[in-house]
Image: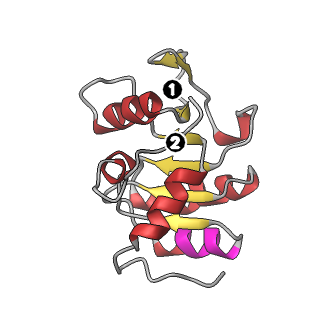
């Protein structure tokens, strides 16, 4: 796989293939704060049937919406398909390296999270990359017909 131009729009098929093939999504920067955008994304993805793993190193934070919180990707005890990142763009290369370490297939940077070095790192490791998008929003775009058939 070569490098994609992430400044251009992604094809519907590319996004659809990712969101219909991944099952387990680690959310880096997941927050217990109900007013935060990341909380709403976590809620919707979880309710849609994805296995969501919140990642947040905050001491004493045990769970978000009943989902066990892990301090880092490395400490997660199961296969991670996709890493969805709610962090500053400059943090993305580090997260990309961690995602590669744990064998994730997709690195997804949320809206505003764009870092081309991180994209290259991930693509060189054979991962697919999406940046500056939100999976929650993508799920509700019209190309989802029929709805996702996830084994819930």
Instruction: State yes or no: residue 127 in magenta.
Output: no
The spot of residue 89 in percent (x, y) is 41, 60
The spot of residue 77 in percent (x, y) is 75, 31
Give the labeled residue for mark 1.
58
For marks 1 and 2 on the same chain, the one whose residue lies earlier in the sequence: 1
**For discs 1 and 2, the disc positioned in front in the rendered view:** 2
The spot of residue 83 in percent (x, y) is 56, 49
Does residue 61 show up?
no
What are the residue bounds of the magenta stretch?
Answer: 118-124
Q: In the rendered image, which quarter contains the N terminus?
A: bottom right
The numbered disc on residue 149 is 2
Query: As drawn, is 136 to the left or to the right of 103?
Result: left
The spot of residue 105 in percent (x, y) is 66, 58
Q: Main secondary structure of the magenta part?
A: helix
Instruction: Report the colour scheme.
Output: secondary structure
Query: As drawn, is 103 to the left or to the right of 138?
Result: right
- Residue drawn at point x = 59 percent, y = 67 percent: 128
Crowd around label 2: few <14 · some 14–19 · many ≥20 (10 Å)? few
- In-front residue for pair 90/116: 116
Does residue 101 show up?
yes
């Amino acid at each position: 796989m070569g490098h994609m131009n992430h400044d251009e729009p992604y094809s519907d098929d590319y996004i659809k293939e990712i969101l219909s093939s991944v099952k387990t999504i680690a959310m880096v920067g997941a927050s217990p704060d109900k007013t935060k955008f990341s909380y709403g994304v976590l809620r919707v993805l979880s309710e849609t049937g994805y296995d969501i793993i919140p990642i947040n190193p905050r001491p004493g934070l045990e769970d978000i919406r009943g989902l066990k919180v892990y301090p880092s990707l490395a400490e997660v005890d199961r296969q991670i398909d996709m890493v969805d990142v709610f962090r500053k763009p400059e943090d993305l290369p580090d997260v990309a390296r961690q995602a590669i370490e744990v064998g994730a297939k997709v690195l997804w940077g949320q809206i505003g999270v764009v870092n081309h070095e991180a994209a290259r790192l991930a693509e060189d490791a054979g991962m697919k990359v999406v940046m500056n998008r939100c999976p929650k929003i993508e799920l509700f775009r019209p190309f989802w017909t029929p709805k996702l058939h996830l084994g819930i």
